[in-house]
């Protein structure tokens, strides 16, 4: 009988067995690594903006409260981008000749909004609401990171569903006293889980409902 | 060995091909609906957020109460705030004052907030509440200034709700009293506690040796 398999077949069989197991595993790992990498999530990448607005200067150095500009954060789903009128409240007096602020002055004169580039967003099937989060003791920096240190604003967290769920499953690890919500310098105490459990009770947060689909999706 | 039937190969590969398609499915991520502050080609200016036509009044939002919404009745500023005066009102007023007013006017209202200190080229410094003129001004005046602005101060109406404007006005009264109080204003039982501190600072000027840090400071040094 004729030899069906030449001697090289042994090697080919071993290599293809190994690759057949390895390649899918590598592809899976690579895929998940890429989806979590800043390349995809845009985390830590400052975006170009029409005006190089510095939160670091306005919050850290001048001490403005988040709500000076983001006025609807307690009232509705959006924290609210300030209208040009808010900028000009100070910049009609300060830095009036700065070329960097030319787009702001132009917007004020023409009434045409400044087109900022979107830094943080969730897919359209997510119905996120700022007001309920700040009312229940979730601080700004919990999701937005150290905004008070950002020269140019960047996204600090991936905003994946898995990331949201960390807190929706265990809010006691992230919650803080309501008075500290707008404080960018707040840091959690050592016994924060213990304190957090009390706050979760006190604020009436029903943890068992927080992972219901309809909490975020309609 | 016989070559496998093409149909079987196709059947085996079809699910794989479907798998490849899943990556291109974004119609739920980007739905054809208006989202506040986002871009949208539907309107001429390309923005999803549109101003209502002039004169539009939302259902139930007709501002009939002249005193509450203008701070004046037929042009006369009102003397009594149309909000209850209690601890809650004052605390809310303090919080809103800290957010919207203190950056320029300072946490005590002497007109020396952080913006006033940093804005070296300001044509006019922010108002000082501790003058006879402003101490005697009806409270409706403060509501009116927050609502319509005054001098170089812009209107804060878009940022502060009417209810909060009144609470801020009440808190300004608190500040005025706190900086212009006489020993006789303190209940007799509490007076002794003040004894050691001597006379209150001269009215109308910030307490000696105190820099106003209300509107902020370089807080990087004191991060907790």
Image: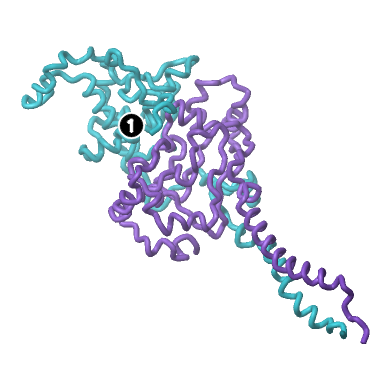
Which is nearer the eye, B206 or A152?
A152
Residue most extreme to the right: A2
Q: Is residue A214 above or below residue B14?
A: above
Q: Is residue B211 above or below residue A158?
A: above
Residue most extreme to the left: B189
Left/right of residue B33 with respect to residue B179 in the rendered view: right
Which x, y percent locates residue A196?
A: 33, 50
Q: Is residue B22 above or below residue B120?
A: below
Which is nearer the eye, A199 or B175?
A199
Q: Which chain contains the residue that carries disc 1?
A: B
Which x, y percent locates residue B172?
A: 28, 28
Which residue position is annotated with label 1?
A: B143
Which x, y percent locates residue A23?
A: 72, 63
- The tint of chain B in the picture is cyan
Q: Is residue A85 visible?
A: no
The residue that appears at 53% across and 34% down in the rendered structure is: A150
Q: Residues within 10 Å of mark 1 (few under 14, many from 20)?
A: many
The residue that appears at 23% across and 20% down in the rendered structure is: B179
Element under disc 1: helix
Which is nearer the eye, A19 or A58?
A19
Q: Is residue A98 visible?
A: yes
Which x, y percent locates residue B150?
A: 41, 24
Q: Quadrant of residue B19?
A: bottom right
Left/right of residue B111 with respect to residue A119 in the rendered view: left
- The tint of chain A in the picture is purple
Position of the N terminus of chain A, as image quadrant, is: bottom right
């Amino acid at each position: 009988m004729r030899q069906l398999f030449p001697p090289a077949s042994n090697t080919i069989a071993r290599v293809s067995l190994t690759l057949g197991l390895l390649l899918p595993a590598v592809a899976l790992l690579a895929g998940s690594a890429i989806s979590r990498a800043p390349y995809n999530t845009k985390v830590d990448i400052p975006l170009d903006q029409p005006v190089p607005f510095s939160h670091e200067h306005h919050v850290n150095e001048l001490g403005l409260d988040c709500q000076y500009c983001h006025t609807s954060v307690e009232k509705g789903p959006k924290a609210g981008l300030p209208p040009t009128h808010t900028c000009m409240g100070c910049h009609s007096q300060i830095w009036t000749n700065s070329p960097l602020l030319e787009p702001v002055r132009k917007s004020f004169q023409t009434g045409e909004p400044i087109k900022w580039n979107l830094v943080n967003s969730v897919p359209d099937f997510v119905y996120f609401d700022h007001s309920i989060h700040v009312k229940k003791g979730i601080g700004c920096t919990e999701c937005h990171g150290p905004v008070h240190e950002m020269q140019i604003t960047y996204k600090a967290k991936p905003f994946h569903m898995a990331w949201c769920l960390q807190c929706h499953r265990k809010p006691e690890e992230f919650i803080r006293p309501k008075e500290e919500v707008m404080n960018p310098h707040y840091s959690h105490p050592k016994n924060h889980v213990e304190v957090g459990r009390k706050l979760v009770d006190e604020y009436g947060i029903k943890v068992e409902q927080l992972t219901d689909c309809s909490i975020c999706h309609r | 060995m016989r070559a496998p039937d093409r149909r079987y190969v196709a059947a085996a590969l079809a699910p794989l091909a479907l798998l490849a398609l899943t990556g291109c499915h974004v119609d739920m991520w980007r739905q054809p609906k208006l989202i506040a502050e986002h871009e949208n080609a539907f309107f001429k200016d390309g923005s999803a957020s549109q101003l209502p036509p002039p004169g539009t009044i939302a259902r139930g939002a007709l501002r009939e109460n002249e005193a509450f919404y203008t701070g004046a009745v037929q042009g006369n500023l009102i003397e009594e705030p149309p909000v209850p005066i209690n601890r809650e009102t004052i605390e809310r007023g303090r919080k809103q004052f800290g957010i919207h007013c203190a950056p320029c006017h300072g946490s005590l209202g002497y007109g020396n907030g952080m913006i006033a200190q940093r804005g070296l080229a300001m044509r006019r410094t922010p108002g000082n509440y501790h003058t006879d003129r402003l101490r005697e001004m009806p409270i409706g005046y403060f509501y009116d200034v927050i609502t319509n602005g005054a001098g170089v101060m812009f209107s804060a109406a878009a940022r502060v709700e009417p209810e909060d404007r009144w609470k801020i006005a009440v808190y300004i009264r608190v500040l005025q009293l706190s900086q212009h109080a006489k020993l006789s204003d303190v209940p007799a039982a509490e007076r002794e506690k003040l004894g050691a501190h001597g006379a209150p600072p001269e009215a109308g000027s910030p307490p000696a040796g105190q820099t106003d840090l209300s509107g902020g400071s370089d807080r990087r040094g004191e991060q907790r």
